[in-house]
Image: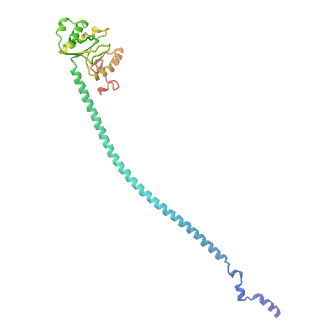
Amino acid sequence: MKKAQCAASPAKSETPSSKRLRPADSPGTTSPAGKDIADILESIDKRLSTFDARLSLVELLHREFKCLRESLEFSQQQVETLAAENATLRESVKCLTDNVTELNRENKKIKETVIDLQARSMRDNLVFSGIPEAAGEDAETTVKSFIKTHLKLPEDTVKNIVFDRVHRLGPIRTAAGRPRPIVAKFGHFKQKEHVKSRGRELKGTDFSVNDQFPKEILERRRVLFPIRRGFIQKGSRSVIAVDRLYVDGQLHRDPDTTPWLY
């Protein structure tokens, strides 16, 4: 019985040296709990590193955003300044445009006044066209002879006609061609109208007798002649007075054909 107890006791007892030699407590080994903690710490360290990187990125983005905001504020100030300057310039342009419009209106009035004065100064003039031209001729004698011969006015009436001035229009033509017209300024308006009324005698000939007008009015009359012809073909009574067309007693106003009336 005692031998059995003695045989079993060595298996149950442990010495200090045997405790130091246990595998779990030997150098170079880590307990499972310690390994978990190390992994957690390593994970935390990695996350902190990632967080630091992200924080640096956020700070960088914040600085860039701040710069962008300052740039945007500066740009906004520039835009506001330019808008104010643009408004001022627009107002100046409007004033200038209004002034130019008014000047054009005044210029048109002055031009029309000058044309009217020119037309009035020519109201006693007649232009005789187609009369042959001779070297050294006396223009007044030529016109009186033409009135007597082709307009068939009595000789006594022709002798009493008074001219203030009679001359050919334009420079002397060296080449053969249509002779220069003669302009005659009558001393009396009634005599001028009397001679003009005989113009029907020239129908079918190469001669003509017409009022003298400034160049601008002649251009306007050229525009009105075909329009007048169209109204006559429609049966309307149409008359051109200077640079105005009257249809059945009413002034014809058309911005496309009579812009000078507007």
Q: What residue is shown at x 82% (from left), y 93% (from top)?
A: 3
Residue 104: x and y in percent read 28, 33
Residue 260: x and y in percent read 30, 26
User: Looking at the rendering, in which quadrant would you find the C terminus?
Assistant: top left
User: Looking at the rendering, in which quadrant would you find the N terminus?
Assistant: bottom right
Q: What residue is shown at x 30% (from left), y 39% (from top)?
A: 96
Residue 163: x and y in percent read 18, 14
Q: Is residue 89 visible from the viewing direction of this image?
A: yes
Left or right for 247, reference 24? left
Q: Quadrant of residue 27?
A: bottom right
Left or right for 62, reference 154? right
Q: Quadrant of residue 175?
A: top left
Q: What residue is shown at x 25% (from left), y 25% (from top)?
A: 115
Q: Is residue 184 visible from the viewing direction of this image?
A: no
Residue 144: x and y in percent read 21, 9
Give the number of marks.
Answer: 0
What sort of colour scheme is used for the picture? Answer: rainbow
Q: Is residue 139 above or below residue 87?
A: above
Q: Is residue 51 above or below residue 120?
A: below
Q: Is residue 103 above or below residue 198?
A: below
Q: Quadrant of residue 152?
A: top left
Q: What residue is shown at x 71% (from left), y 88% (from top)?
A: 17
**Residue closest to the eye, 231 or 214:** 214
